[in-house]
Amino acid sequence: MAQTNENIDLHDLFESLSEELPEDADLSELTEKWHHYLEHPIDLNKTDGKELTELQFLNPLLLEHLLEHRTISGNFINVLELQSIEGFNERIVALLLPFVTVGAESPLKTLKVRNFKQEFIVRYARILEKAKGYSIVDTTRSRYLGDANRYALRYRAQLNDRIRLAVNMEKDAGEPFFRDRQKLGFDFYSLSLSIKALGRFKNIVIGDYALQFGQGLSMWNGLNFGKGGLVQNTARQGIGVKSYTSLNEANFMRGIAGTLQIEHFEITPYFSYHTIDGKVNRAVFPATISTIASTGLHRTPTEQQYRHAASQMAYGLNLLWRYKRLKIGIHFNQTQFDAFKTKGKSIRQEAEFEGDLLRNISLYANYTIRNTYLFGEYANSMDGGSALLAGSIISLHPRLSSVILLRDYKKNFHTFYGQGFGESNNTSNEQGVYLGLTYQLGRKLVWSNYVDIFRFPAAKYQADTTSMGADFFSQLSYIWYKKGQLSIRYRNRLKQVNYMGAGHTEKGLVNTGKQQLRMELHYRLSSIWTIRSCIESNIFQKEYQEKSFGMMCYQDVFWKSTVRKIQLNMRIAYFNAASYDNRIYAYEQDVLYASGFGMYNTKGWRAYLNLQYRLNRHLQVWAKYAVYYYPGRENIGTGLDQIEGNRKSEAKLQLRWQL
């Protein structure tokens, strides 16, 4: 099972959760979790649901149906019983099957034998062409202080699934390495020790950790997915405390946290203290922070000056009460800086947080009654603002389910850790209604739809006054069990933005719209060959301006040897986007734990080749070569990233040793 599923194509999983993510989004915390459960499948007869929640793509109502099925019908005999559970259509079953198992426990597991596992990964990557930032020798100008090499080291150790150690080290391209201000080598070091079932403590994490509570209005570290093809997944399922294993250098906690179980109560106290990047002026009293940076990049003299310039201390308490199908929680957090955070001077920054101390308190709950799952959270930043989210998932019919979600985030609601569902990413200054519907037309045919109507009461990025918008989505999917999937997707996004046209003397708003149509086929030709074909086109229209067009098509080919020692996959893509507004995102295969979404912009070609080879049962190697080719262009990129010529290529090499 582990060898068969270890290299499953994660494309469908990510695009089901979100159709586009930033190019620099680090997806490793989720891919690492998926690969763990591929190698150690979840036993459907033993899970309490938490492990299934960690997979991210199983909504809470489906989870309740699964647990209820087991209670009423007894233990699962075969994983294919999932098909008989209400709401488990072909698409969900196909996504879930690789991660679950049913079977008698091995006699070896009953013996008290130490099960110690280790994993060490080293990764090297580099853009092969030389960017402008590496050629500047004038020390008075902005430039890259290090070389173009990227390094990442990961170490994992696990003892009896109770004690886990995670160590990360990373250097980004352009950052110094064992010199200048980074004499200790890597730019980012991370360590996390997790201990499960220690007395009354369900778990304790020391070092770097993430917190996820309620619907994420007040506290949600790590990855968060917005709108996607699994429309019911708008309901968040916070898992409390977990180790932080991502290479992302922001939005995590550093200290100690743990969850204490006392009958129906779960008590989670936590403390965190670490430095953050930002523009800090210590020549005045009190010292001020005018900008907080979260990119994690420290390549130039300015970025080095921002590095670890301020400190952030956070502590709080989460209290969760569980009783049958009801959960009620309350969360309190206090965050303090060692300098005074000032707000910006632009009109959209008028309601920003200002001060050196912020307190948040939130109340959240969820309840399942028959075929309805109710959820919500109310949060308040105790300097004045509030945020509210409420919704329900309803199974209207064995083949029809819906979701309704309402949100109202005040412009003066402040949080440093919240990631509430919404069109924007700052959980403030937004009101909206989200309606989703999934209809199983047949055993293999699923139709997913949503409409999200939103409003920004105050100024925001690219809109200096109240603005509105809407997002319409519809996807039809046909699934061949163990063979593949054909999907057709339509999306139309409407927004209002600032506009100053010829002859105008006053600023105003204009309407914009972007319509997208994508067709994609993923099919397994044999046990050796698999193909994926995709074509997407879009039309962008801004009021008073001409329409612009974008398109992209690609062909993926996957090959694996019959002995499973070697695997290859490749892509060839053509794209033509008339403007940045016509850009297209598409998931790309990569080395283990390094997958991401590529951006296809302007006009050109994209190709890559991935190789994976298992040298022996302890050692594996991955290699990737990828290239963008832009015919007729004299340079690529802007600023310090500008490359002379029409080609941008990248090479990666990764080794994994397991014991």
Image: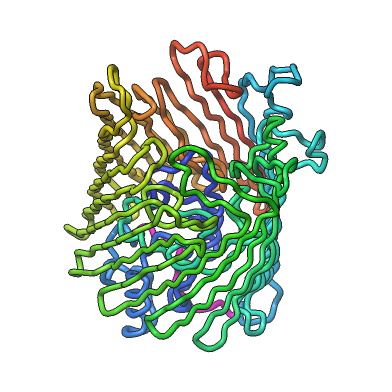
Is residue 227 among what the camera can see? yes
Q: Residue at x 27, y 28 (%)?
A: 542
Q: Residue at x 62, y 61 (%)?
A: 209
The quadrant holding residue 85 is bottom left
Left-right relation of 497 to 382: left
Front one among 659 and 224: 224
Left-right relation of 192 to 220: right
Q: Is residue 595 above or below residue 206?
A: above
Left-right relation of 616 to 558: right
Q: Residue at x 49, y 78 (%)?
A: 320
The percent coordinates of residue 384 (x first, y second) are 47, 61
Is residue 1 among what the camera can see? no
Front one among 134 and 80: 134
Q: Is residue 177 above or below residue 410?
A: above
Front one among 350 and 437: 350
Is 100 included in the stretch rendered in magenta? yes
Q: Residue at x 35, y 51 (%)?
A: 227
Q: Is residue 18 above or below residue 370?
A: above
Left-right relation of 18 to 193: left
Task: Give the magenta range.
Answer: 94-107
Quarter of the image with the C terminus is bottom right
Extreme residue in the front direction = 285
Is 34 included in the stretch rendered in magenta? no
The percent coordinates of residue 496 (x first, y second) are 29, 37
Q: How many numbered marks have been drawn onto this rendered protein structure?
A: 0
